[in-house]
Image: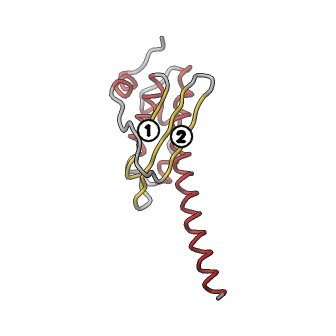
Amino acid sequence: MPAYSAKVMDHFMNPRNVGEIENPDGVGEVGNPVCGDMMTFYIKVQDNRLEDVKFKTFGCGAAIAVSSMVSEMAKGKTLDEAARITPKLVAEELEGLPKQKFHCSNLGAQALNKAIEDYRSKQKKVAGGKENERQKTRRR
């Protein structure tokens, strides 16, 4: 069994921000078919900041610890700041991950980024819809 830091064990035994957000502004889901880990991140955005971040993870202890840490690191950050959370930063915050578990930190960062991308694509559609309405009004 790989040796985990006390911080990894703490986030595994007492994960923060577990659950779903009702009517989330963005959802990101990733999985690794090799190890079977699945992560889903839910975000609530207020004034371009992550007001709330929740996750559901099916996977090993490292995957759960990574999800918990990523959610903690992202909460309260602007979308751009949160999008810059890298697997390396996550692993450093957790005081290291065993080499064979480093892929878990990739999944956590990817799931968060997918949730941010989901939110941004929804915003573009809303903005695009408003733009189309303005153009239709102008043509009349």
Residue plotted at (64% across, 80% down) = 135
The mark closer to the camera, 2 or 1, is: 1
Residue 120 spot, x, y in % from top left:
55, 57
Residue plotted at (55% across, 58% down) = 122
Nearest the eye: 20 or 64: 20
Q: Examine the image and state in which quarter residue 7 appears.
A: top left
Determine the secondary structure under disc 2: helix
Nearest the eye: 68 or 123: 123
**In the depicted structure, whether residue 27 falls above or below residue 124:** above
Q: Is residue 140 left or right of residue 104?
A: right
2 and 1 marks in contact (CB < 8 Å)? yes
Q: Is residue 64 left or right of residue 120?
A: left
The residue that mark 1 highlights is: 55
Q: Examine the image and state in which quarter residue 129 appears.
A: bottom right
Q: Residues within 10 Å of mark 2 (few under 14, many from 20)?
A: many
Residue plotted at (58% across, 63% down) = 124
- Give the amino acid type for the residue marked by disc 2 in the picture: Ala
Residue 93 spot, x, y in % from top left:
42, 33
Specify the quadrant that holds the C terminus. bottom right
The residue that mark 2 highlights is: 111
Dot 2 or dot 1: first in sequence order is: 1
